[in-house]
Amino acid sequence: MIIVYVSIALVVLSLIYLGIVAVKTSKETKVSLNDFSATAARLQEKVDKINEETTNLTNTSNQITENIQSKKETIQGVIGEAKATPEPFKKLFTSIKNTPNPQKDTSDERLVELGDRLIDMWGRYRVKRKSRAE
């Protein structure tokens, strides 16, 4: 009969030990789960920040692209105007060459007249250029 009591006592002690180990394991698991949850939350915050920075970078990239396109169009317009610039001066010099000059000596009056023409043409060219730019 003593063996039965010893066996029952051994089973009871085993159940008590099992309970203690289960509670201890449960506490350790709870701490590990809390750490895991905190790590997951920090990771999610970093992912959110990366997504926000990606969006900002995309917006900035689009603005830069639009700015470059606008400046490219402006420069192309300026280049087109620069290519067209020699034409009025060619016409002016052609008309000067074709003007008959019986004296072969250029008088001061003719120089003043030529200067006035050049200034007038330059003024008209600048006005025309400004009106195209606007």
Image: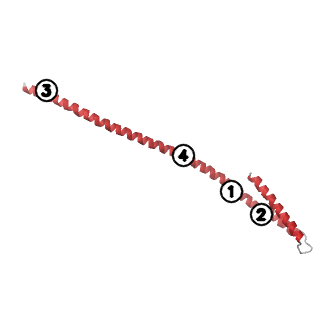
Sequence-wise, which precedes: disc 4 or disc 1? Answer: 4
Task: Tell me if mark 2 has few (under 14), some (14-19) or many (20+) residues whose alpha carbon lies within 10 angstroms of its own.
Answer: few
Q: Residue at x 23, y 34 (%)?
A: 21
C-alpha distance separating marks 3 and 4: 71 Å
Among numbered discs 3 and 2, the one appearing first in the sequence: 3
Give the position of the N terminus as an image quadrant.
Answer: top left
On screen, residue 102 above or below 64: below
Is the residue marked by circle 1 packed among few (<14), some (14-19), or many (20+) residues within 10 Å? few
Between disc 1 and disc 3, whose residue precedes? 3
Disc 4: CA contacts within 10 A as few (<14), some (14-19) or many (>=20): few
- For the residue marked with disc 3, what is the amino acid? Ile
Residue shown at the point (69%, 56%) measured from the top left:
76
Q: The residue tagged with tag 2: helix, strand or loop? A: helix
Where is residue 7, by image quadrant? Answer: top left
Give the alpha-carbon distance from disc 1 to disc 3, as whole Å: 98 Å
Q: Which residue is mark 3?
A: 8
Alpha carbons under labels 1 and 2: distance apart: 18 Å
What kind of residue is marked 4? Asn
| Residue bearing the label numbered 4 | 56
Which element is circle 1 on? helix
Could you say where residue 83 lies in the image, as x and y percent from the top left?
Answer: 74, 61
For residue 104, above or below residue 5: below
Q: Which residue is mark 1?
A: 75
Which label sits in the foreground, 4 or 1? 4
Q: Earlier in the sequence, mark 1 or mark 2?
A: 1
Left or right of residue 96: residue 84: left
* Disc on the earlier residue, 3 or 4: 3
Spot occupied by residue 55 in the image (x, y as percentages of width and height): 53, 44
**Three-letter amino acid code at disc 2?**
Pro
SS under mark 3: helix
**Residue type marked 1:** Ile
